[in-house]
Image (tube, rainbow, N blue to C red):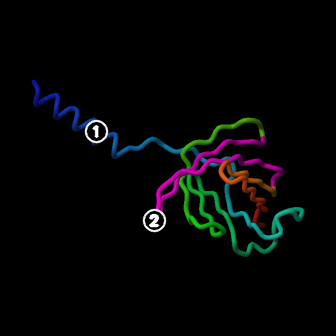
């Protein structure tokens, strides 16, 4: 009986590790540029640095961490989202939280909780 319980507990733990909780998807997708972020419409030339949203992954060539995985997205209003991402590189592992505001179909603003930094982005055309 005890062996069966140990075996069952081990199988449950193994199944849990193999299937981690699914991350949320971002409320936007595609490539966005930091360059000339306040200009109207999408950017005709999407030069670096850029940020790309792909499902639950965010790639960022404009920061010290090139890749993030989304942990949670909570919608506050039609255009305002609270987001938590995690990152891992060879030197560090951590989480970053921020507010993502969709200004219009071609413009975003990210306000990071730590440090008070804001980033404006423009959709790549």
In this rendering, the answer to whether 30 lies above or below 46 is above
**Horizontal side, residue 124 vs residue 52: left or right:** right
Where does label 1 land, which residue? Answer: 13
x then y, percent, for residue 82: 67, 42
Q: Which residue extends farthest right?
A: 40
Disc 1 or disc 2, which is closer to the eye? 2
Question: Which residue is painted at 56% across and 56% down in the image?
Answer: 57
- Taking depth in this image into account, of 3 and 65 the one nearest to the observer is 65
x then y, percent, for residue 9: 23, 33
Question: Which residue is painted at 33% across and 44% down in the image?
Answer: 17
Which quadrant does the C terminus fall into?
A: bottom right
**Neighbourhood count class around disc 2 (C-alpha, 10 Å): few under 14, some 14–19, many 20 upward:** few
Please identify the dominant SS of the magenta region.
Answer: strand
Residue 81, numbered label: none
The span shown in magenta is 79-105
Calculate the distance from the C-alpha at mark 1 to the C-alpha at mark 2.
Answer: 28 Å
Question: Which residue is painted at 13% across and 29% down in the image?
Answer: 4
- Taking depth in this image into account, of 110 and 79 the one nearest to the observer is 110
Mark sitting earlier along the chain (1/2): 1
Q: Is residue 83 magenta?
A: yes
Q: Is residue 115 magenta?
A: no
**Neighbourhood count class around disc 1 (C-alpha, 10 Å): few under 14, some 14–19, many 20 upward:** few
Which quadrant does the N terminus fall into?
A: top left
Where does label 2 land, which residue? Answer: 91
Question: Which residue is painted at 72% across and 52% down in the image?
Answer: 116
Q: Quadrant of residue 36?
A: bottom right
x then y, percent, for residue 101: 76, 47
């Amino acid at each position: 009986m005890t062996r069966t319980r140990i075996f069952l507990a081990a199988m449950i733990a193994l199944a849990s590790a193999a299937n981690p909780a699914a991350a949320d998807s971002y409320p936007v997708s595609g490539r966005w540029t930091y360059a000339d972020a306040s200009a109207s419409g999408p950017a005709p030339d999407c030069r670096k640095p850029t940020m790309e949203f792909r499902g639950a992954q965010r790639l960022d060539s404009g920061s010290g961490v090139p890749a993030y995985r989304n942990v949670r997205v909570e919608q506050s209003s039609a255009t305002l989202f609270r987001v938590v991402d995690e990152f891992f590189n060879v030197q560090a592992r951590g989480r970053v939280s921020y507010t993502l505001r969709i200004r219009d179909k071609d413009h975003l603003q990210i306000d990071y909780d730590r440090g008070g930094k804001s980033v404006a982005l423009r959709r790549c055309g």
